[in-house]
Amino acid sequence: METIIIDTNNLMHKVGSLKKLLDKDKDIVVDTMIAKMQNHFFGNKIKVTLVFDGYGKNKHHGNFEVKFAKTNSLDYENADKLIKTLIDKARTPKLLKIVTSDNEISWYAKDSGCKIQSSESFWGELKDKKIQQKIREGDINEKPQEVTKMEYDYLLREFTKS
């Protein structure tokens, strides 16, 4: 079974929409990521492990896991060390996909025989798949009916840059 291990701290800082939320409240970002991942991967034949820095309680539900670098019984110091440990413990590293834009973790994973995907690419892929699914189900038009003020301001800034 393929396993995706996600460096969530890296994802939070590399993806613009998550970074904006992170500036407001880390818990909102964590909840957003978990909900999006569960919605996308729950019930698939892919195991997904979200790895977080800091203290927390590990959770497991179906093919979905949330792991923290520090728990009441374990201390890996940080998410990077926990990810490396998960890679080392894998029976078949070629079935692992590591999602990170951290060069050190990427090199370690590649040297171990894992697949690698950048955080930005992964998040974009999730977004694209969700939009395509909604289009197929008829829940969304390919083109939006209206543009919000925030979207308009963003597009105006992007296309009027010199």
Image (cartoon, rainbow, N blue to C red):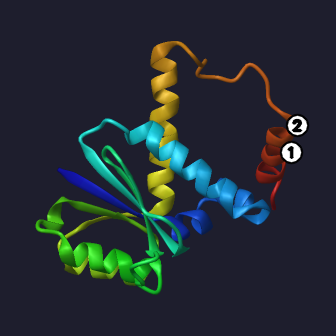
* Residue 54 percent across, percent down from the top left: 55, 77
Furthest toward the left, the residue is 91
Query: Which residue is found at the position 35% from the left and 75% from the top?
Result: 83
Query: Which residue is found at the position 30% from the left and 46% from the top?
Result: 63
**107 lies left or right of 131:** left
Furthest toward the front, the residue is 72
Q: Label 1's element? A: helix
Query: Which residue is found at the position 39% from the left and 80% from the top?
Result: 74
| Amino acid type, residue under disc 2 in the picture | Lys
| Residue of label 2 | 149
* Other-residue count near label 1 (Cα within 10 Å), few / some / many at <14 / 14–19 / ≥20: few
Whether the residues at callouts 1 and 2 have beta carbons within 8 Å, the answer is yes
| Amino acid type, residue under disc 1 in the picture | Asp
Question: Can you see residue 81?
Answer: yes
Above or below — where is 145 with respect to 65?
above
Mark 1 vs mark 2, CA separation in Å: 6 Å
Dot label at residue 6: none
Viewer-nearest residue: 75 or 161 = 75
**105 lies left or right of 119:** left
Query: Which residue is found at the position 54% from the left and 70% from the top?
Result: 9
User: In the picture, which quadrant includes the C terminus?
Assistant: bottom right
Question: Can you see residue 102?
Answer: no
Q: How many marks?
A: 2
Above or below — where is 67 with respect to 151?
below
Q: Quadrant of residue 30?
A: bottom right
Q: Label 2's element? A: helix
* Residue 53 percent across, percent down from the top left: 52, 75
* Other-residue count near label 2 (Cα within 10 Å), few / some / many at <14 / 14–19 / ≥20: few
* Residue 113 percent across, percent down from the top left: 17, 72
| Residue of label 1 | 153
